Structure formats: structure tokens, C-alpha cells
Image (tube, helix red, strand yellow):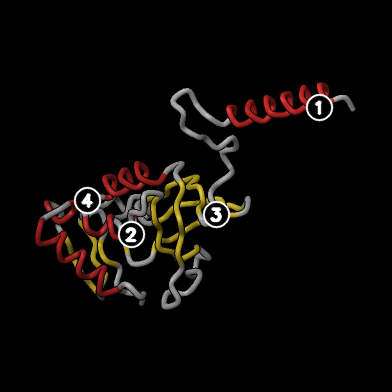
Amino acid sequence: MPRRYIKKLLIAVALVGLSALGAGVTQTGDLRLPDPERTPPGYHRVVEVSDGDTFKVKIAGVTETVRLIGIDTPETKDPRKPVQCFGRAASDEAKHLLKGKLVRLEGDPESGDRDKYQRLLRFAYLEDGTFYNQHMVEQGFAFAYTIFPNSKLELFRSWERQAREAKRGLWAGCPVSESNDKRQTGNE
């Protein structure tokens, strides 16, 4: 093959390669994922937020319900009960932080893999590294859920104590009752 044809072929291949790279870059120069289902290894996209302590993710094409370890938010979804004080705020915070976003899920050997409803039991970390479970308790959107064991139980108790003492979130104005180590707020 003559040398000039090889040169033209190499230039054409290079241009096609550069065009393909450019297709993945937005006008601001940020790389974007061409497929919304594609996620970085270890991360899963949140497809639905039920409330502050439960959401759904896609894992290998399967939708799984995740129940967060160590936290309990005021109820908003139980049809037998009225919405509890600060429940809507906790759900709104969860939707703001999680809906459509990528999370890294971490199991805990002390909690087991699934609860009696077959929900995955997990800790959740946002893309920026924020420990979601901690954020919800520290900011007063959730109680420390101490009924079931987990490896971070004492940390959750400490974060709840700090939120209560600082009167953050539900601790600022919701009536809180406690029975059998389960805390809940009054109704809205």
C-alpha cells in the first residue's frame, strides 16, 4: 500500500477517534455518561425515594428496596397512621439528596443482609463521600434506630445526642415519645 494512503488512513482514524471522544463531552467540557443506566463500579442509581430511611436502587438491572441501617425517620407512608411531625421534611431531604443520584451501599455483618420484608439493609454514601445515614441523624431528620444491632450503633447514639442538644430538625419543635427504645414524633 502506498505511503500516502497509509497517512490518509491514519489521519481518518485519528479524526474518527477524536470525534468519538468529543461526543462524550458537553459544551462546558464536563464528561457525561452516555447511558443513564451506566454507573461507576460500586455505585447504584436511586430510582425512587419512599421516605427518609427507605429507597429503591437499580442493581444489575434489578430494582431493590434498601432500608437504611441505624436510622428511623418520622412516618409519612403508613396508611394506618397520620403523617408524623417532621416526616415530610425528612422525606423532602431524602428526595433532595438521593433521587436520581448515585450511591455506594455498604452492608453490615451485625445487621444481616435483609430485613423481614426482604429489603436490603445498608449504609449509604453519596458520590461526594457524605455518609447519608449520619447526615440524617446529625441534622435531626432521623432518630438513631437502636432496636437492631449494627457496627456503628454508638456513633448513631452520639449523633442523635448532638442533634437533640443543638435542637436541630425534629428536635427543634416536635413532641417526641419513646417506648421500648423506639422514638417517634407526634402527628403533624
Residue that label 1 marks: 6
Residue that label 2 marks: 133
Comes first in the chain, label 2 or label 1: 1
Residue type indicated by callout 3: Pro
Camera-near label (4 vs 3) is 3
Left or right of residue 81, residue 26 in this image: right
Q: How far apart are marks 4 and 1 (CA)?
A: 73 Å
Q: Residue 119: x and y, percent?
A: 50, 63
Q: How far apart are marks 4 and 3 (CA)?
A: 38 Å
Q: Is mark 4 on a helix, strand or loop?
A: loop
The residue lying at 45 percent from left, 56 percent from top is: 104
Q: Which of 93 and 13 is in front in this view?
A: 13
Camera-near label (2 vs 1) is 1
Circles 3 and 2: CB atoms closer than 8 Å: no
> So how many labels did they put on this image?
4
Question: In the image, is residue 29 above or below residue 38?
Answer: above
Q: How far apart are marks 2 and 4 (CA)?
A: 19 Å
Q: Distance between the residues labelled 3 and 1?
A: 39 Å
Q: Is mark 1 on a helix, strand or loop?
A: helix
Residue that label 3 marks: 41
Comes first in the chain, label 3 or label 2: 3
Camera-near label (3 vs 1) is 1
Comes first in the chain, label 2 or label 4: 4
Q: Residue 59: x and y, percent?
A: 58, 54
Q: Nearer the viewer, residue 78 or 53?
A: 53
Residue that label 4 marks: 85
Q: Nearer the viewer, residue 92 or 30?
A: 30
> What crowding class fits label 3: few (fewer than 14 Cα within 10 Å), some (14-19), or many (20 or more)?
few
Assign the N terminus to one quadrant of the image: top right
